[in-house]
Amino acid sequence: MRNDIQIDKRSIGINFIDGKASVRIWSPDSKSLEVKLENKSIPLTKDDFGFWTITTTNIQPGDLYKLVINNEQEFPDPASVSQPEGVHGRSAAVDVSSFNWTDQSWNNLPLADYILYELHTGTFTPEGTFEAMVSKLDYLKELGVNAIEIMPVAQFPGSRNWGYDGVFPFAVQDSYGGPEGLKKLVDACHAKGIAVVLDVVYNHMGPEGNYLGAFGPYFTSKYNTPWGNAINFDDAHCDGVRSYFIENVLMWFRDFHIDALRMDAVHAIKDFSPVHILREIKLHVNELSQHTGRQHHLIVELDLNDTRFINPLEEQGFGMDGQWIDEFHHALRVTATGESTGYYSDFSGIADLAKSYKDAYVFDGQYSHHRQKFFGIKAEKNPGQQFVVFSQNHDQVGNRMLGERTSELVSYEMQKLLAGAVLASPYLPMLFMGEEYSEPNRFMYFVSHTDKELAEAVRKGRKEEFAAFHAEGEAPDPVSEETFNNSKLQWNLVKEGQHKTMFNFYQQLIQLRKEQPALKHLNRQHLKVSFDEAAKTLLLHRWHEDQHVVCLMNFSQQEQKIQAPTEASNWRKLLASHEPQWLGKTEAPETFEAGEEILLQPESIVIYQNS
């Protein structure tokens, strides 16, 4: 492990120690570098590894500054923690270690207990700020989720963005509340018993305000990515780049008390080093946990079906604690809607859903027609807690041309079935903000680039992206403020009519998952699944010790019959989605006997446990 990183404190950018500012900027090819303040400039001294440093009392917290390279060009600090003037403006010096934390008794939740709720700061509340989010924590507690997953907050151009166009990985978006606002949110979450997962992007940088290349070889032409040259994790001068991102991970955990990171699209990280950057990150996070006594989790978005990423370090894996599995979503979506365009064309529906319940990956060595190759390996030894599943998320909603949620695409009954299919799974369930009350507002793609040519390129790119889905019509203008405003949650609906009923249904499902041992324990070996492709029914049977739970699902639009399992002589009802209390029409039997034939209502899920 590299020895240029200090576990106990941030060592790049500007930091404050004992009343002095410690400045350390990586720019290996520069001839000179200085900090330019309002009324003075401070020259830095270069060391052997391309870092420019000084310790001084002439910089104070709150000071605005830029960095001047070779007495010519001025740029914001690439390791800035705050950009109050936006991506092109001056950086603000921040004492990142200074905050009056009240969460000393908090030490994260076991990953296996996470019930995730993905949200976007700008559209989750009318105000679109961390402070406004704090006011909704009691609502989330009432729902029953215990971990929020926040889409990226690294400073991006303007005030409207999904966050994946961030260009300052260390700086917290100023329009959301900046670094102080995020710390207050995390502290408040911990007081409520809610873990905080932060989405971070280490596979690319956004185009506008991306000045990293001016400081050094942060990018390499050795690899091509959808965003251009790859971030330099294994080419010449990569050590400074690797340190930069490792420092970023440690800062979120140590200085912001973040509980877990979700790393965006790690399959797009290009690194053929003997020690992959993800493995090196995990080694440093383990060291940090030993130093602080706090547990932190690393979750990745991965499109490779490659267990090397999530296998333990001692098995020569990268040690990631978990991953998103889009394939569960795709199989579930095709089963529910019959969609067959784009990447959905690889999925047959209920047979693949049954396989994902059992094997996590749908493709674990078979031929993929969409990818035009044999794809994936088996994930036999990986526990259920390593997989995050969902019926929708920001990608699967917002990357539709019109941003439709499942509330618009499927019936009310099917929405309940989808919820049950996710929350009864042997994996970590994740909800996307608003689905718990059937939010009708679409979640569309939006940006606020100030470069007109770039904005037009984004519009054009969106149109081309949907060609594979044979989408008709025009995509909403991603640059329009109206697109952003129309993507906000409508909180007035939560306590109204069918929206209130849906909320109560989700609440009941989450409670069952927490209380029923067979649902709570994510033992993939204690699971059986069977299905009838013609009838579109699926039986998911899970157990823990003496308790057995069966989840009977009917994805068809007709009544279907299914035979009860014989593992118990009697079964007692826990929940039925088609009953009047959930705005359905039919009561389900309170009990039934082993082997008895059961009549399932259309688009429904019923859950029973052994008596």
Image: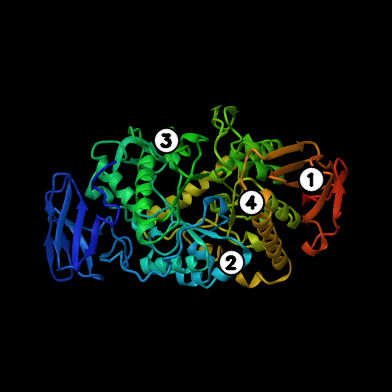
* Quarter of the rendering occupied by the N terminus: top left
Distance Cα–Cα, label 1 vs label 2: 34 Å
SS for dot 1? loop
| Left/right of residue 458 with respect to residue 591 in the rendered view | left
SS for dot 4? helix
| Left/right of residue 355 with respect to residue 118 in the rendered view | right
Circle 4: residue type: Lys
Along the line of sight, which residue is nearer the eye, 180 or 63? Answer: 180
Along the line of sight, which residue is nearer the eye, 251 or 362? Answer: 251
Distance Cα–Cα, label 3 vs label 2: 37 Å
Circle 2: residue type: Lys
Q: Residues within 10 Å of mark 2 (few under 14, many from 20)?
A: some
Q: Quadrant of residue 506?
A: bottom right
Residue 556 numbered mark, or none: 1
Q: Earlier in the sequence, mark 1 or mark 2?
A: 2
Q: Mark 4 points at which residue?
A: 520
Q: In this view, does 405 lie above or below 527?
A: below
Distance Cα–Cα, label 1 vs label 3: 46 Å
Q: Which of marks 2 and 4 is nearer the N terminus?
A: 2
Q: Earlier in the sequence, mark 4 or mark 1?
A: 4
